[in-house]
Amino acid sequence: MPINKHRFQGTIKKSFQHAGEFWIERQPAKLGDYSGTVIVPGTKGILYARLINGQILQVYNNVVPNIPHLDVLIGRDKSQPSVWKVIETIQVHDLSQVPSYLTFHHEQHEYPAPDSVFVRRDQITPLLVLPAGGFNVRFFGDVVYKFGMLAPVRVNDADIDLSSHVITAGAKYVRLDVSTSGTLVYTIGNVVGSKELLELEPLPVPTANGFPVCAFVFYEGQTELRRDSTERTIIDLRMFTSDVVKDAGHQWHDAPALKSLLYLDELGVYSSRDQSMKKIVFGDMMEQIKKYVHIIYGTIKKILLSYIKLGDSAGGDLAGTYPNPAVKAIRGTLVDPALAPTNGQTLLWVTANSRWEAGSSSGFVLVVKEIDGTPTVSNVNTIKFTNGTVTDETGGVVRIDIGSSGLPASLKVFMNRNFTF
């Protein structure tokens, strides 16, 4: 049988093509199972894929986004003939910015992944000010809002010429704020001797209730405004107000007055521990104060308990309760509790009752004591003496002078009764 030249060449060519083909088999499929789940739980890079005949396979993917129902081409290669892999997308739906060969991989750019992308403030556009050559800047607008405003305010983009603020001697700040009406407000600071001295100066006072944007540095010999790693004469003051729904831009001196505090209100404090500003919830602060008050109260209570107070029982020579105790004894010796003296009576010690009672002169004890001696007489109604004189010193005192060995000796008799001498 003669050999057909063209058939032989086709067979040989097909054999060579098959021998050099990397993929053993290819199949069109859609990503995800019938419920729309794309990623196989507990795996990384393994997806569900549905074949045209309805069969669901698990395929390895490192080339396409994990989008449900995405049309892809899958296959098995010679290196791993038992593993199905995603080869490419057949058609990309709603992915005009995503190449068909690139899978979603944002995780590798998120901290602390090894390929983390850190974004500078210069790349965040709301209320951003960037140099535009010379003393011109480009301002990127935004919608601003803070607590107390009736409605959000749109701030438009603007190209700003700041050449009117150029300075020929010294240095100064020019502050830029956005008012609550959406207008740009400039506040010019004081001129100082040099740029170095300006760095020690505070920024100009902010616009009342305004949104801080930036401060420009102008100095002698300056040729342009810059915002780069070499020089930054545009100081970013933004607080990123676009999504702030509460007041975040007030200074204390122009903030609305508050007459009372709620438990969850926050207060700013300066921490002496690390010398930085901190915040504290009012309720937590009250709990701390309460602890200190309890300690102080305990100390004061102990002190007060040691004081005499109304209703306390009297002691010692007193009986009853305060504030009106009664005298029950004199230096420990009892006094008649029914004591009611009449005219001319005095206190008499009654041994039989072991107490002081009101009484007359009967049983009165007179003690006569020499100035340099000891008592020698008791229960005396009559005192006799010779070679002496008696002097009435009034006030119930009688002075008796008696001579002895040529030297006078004196006795004083303290009397409450009339005695015969």
Image: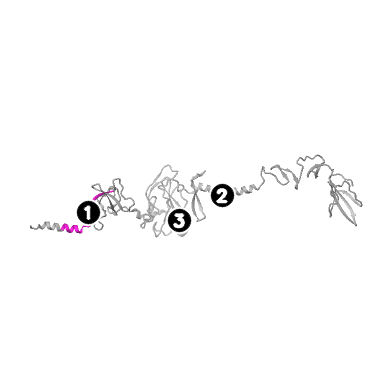
Q: Earlier in the sequence, mark 2 or mark 3?
A: 3
Task: Name the image quarter holding residue 340.
Answer: top right
User: Given the current orientation, which residue lies at the most extreme front position?
Assistant: 352
Q: Residues within 10 Å of mark 1 (few under 14, many from 20)?
A: few
Mark 2 secondary-structure assignment: helix
Q: What amino acid is found at the position of numbered circle 2 in the picture?
A: Tyr
x then y, percent, for residue 265: 49, 46
Task: Using residue 27 as the reference point, say whether residue 420 is left or right of it.
Answer: right
x then y, percent, for residue 300: 61, 48
Residue at 89 percent across and 53 percent down: it is 402
Q: CA distance from mark 1 to mark 3?
A: 73 Å
Q: Please, is residue 337 above or below residue 47 in the view?
A: above
The residue closer to the viewer here, 363 or 382, is 363
> For mark 1, what is the residue?
25
> For mark 2, what is the residue?
292
Residue at 45 percent across and 54 percent down: it is 173
**Is 143 in the magenta?**
no
Question: Which range is magenta?
Answer: 13-31
Residue at 23 percent across and 56 percent down: it is 23
The quarter of the picture where the N terminus appears is bottom left
Task: Using residue 316 as the reference point, say whether residue 218 is left or right of it.
Answer: left
Task: Using residue 336 as the reference point, say whether residue 10 is left or right of it.
Answer: left
> For mark 3, what is the residue?
172
Is residue 167 among what the camera can see? no
Q: What amino acid is found at the position of numbered circle 1 in the picture?
A: Glu
The residue closer to the viewer here, 204 or 314, is 314
